[in-house]
Amino acid sequence: MTDIEYLDLAEALLRRVEEQCDALNEDTDADIDNQRAGGLMTLTFANGSQLVINLQRPLHEIWMAARAGGFHYRWADGIWHDTKTGNDFFADLSTLASDCAGRPLAFTA
């Protein structure tokens, strides 16, 4: 994958997360504050817990940090996969965000 291909895919992922946070805030009482500075996005929940999503350009990865730990994702077969478990980024985001919010939240690619 070239640097440009990585950036296109990674930026699309961050935009998708932003869009879904906005939709969840409109459709539910989730109250997710999403702040973005370049390749760093912080999702802050009503109880103060946070998820941090960060682009790792040199490695062509996306990292996500949560209370449960840190996760690294690489693009393969049309999906961002966790490098340890193989889990899909959006499935993990749904699980981790639900934990932070104390209620079920669903994020999809």
Image (spheres, helix red, strand yellow):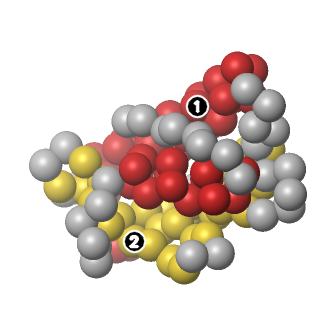
Task: Quarter of the image for the N terminus: give it.
Answer: bottom left
The correct choice, above or below, for 100 with respect to 103 in the image is: below
The correct choice, above or below, for 74 with respect to 41 in the image is: below
Instruction: Measure how far apart labels 1 and 2 are at the Cα level.
Output: 21 Å
Q: Position of residue 91 (x, y in %)?
A: 40, 50
Per the image, label 2 sits on a secondary structure element best described as strand
Residue at image position (48%, 68%) is 63
Mark 1 or mark 2: whose residue is earlier in sequence: 1
Q: Count residues near mark 1 (Cα–Cα under 10 Å), then give few for <14, some for 14-19, many for 20+.
A: some
In the image, is 72 to the left or to the right of 53?
A: left
The correct choice, above or below, for 38 with respect to 12 in the image is: below
Asked whether 105 or 77 is in front, the reply is 105
- How many callouts does the rendering have? 2
- Specify the farthest residue to the right: 47
The amino acid beneath tag 1 is Gln
Q: Position of residue 72 (x, y in %)?
A: 39, 71
In the image, is 90 to the left or to the right of 25?
A: left
Q: Which mark is on residue 88?
A: none
- Write down the residue under mark 1: 20
Picture quadrant of residue 48:
bottom right
Q: Can residue 15 be seen in this view?
A: no
Task: Quarter of the image for the C terminus: give it.
Answer: top left
The amino acid beneath tag 2 is His
Per the image, label 1 sits on a secondary structure element best described as helix
Q: Where is residue 38 in the image (x, y as percent from the top left)?
A: 64, 53
- Specify the farthest residue to the front: 103
Q: Is residue 89 visible?
A: yes
- Write down the residue under mark 2: 72
Residue at image position (49%, 62%) is 55
Q: Count residues near mark 2 (Cα–Cα under 10 Å), then give few for <14, some for 14-19, many for 20+.
A: many
Residue at image position (32%, 67%) is 82
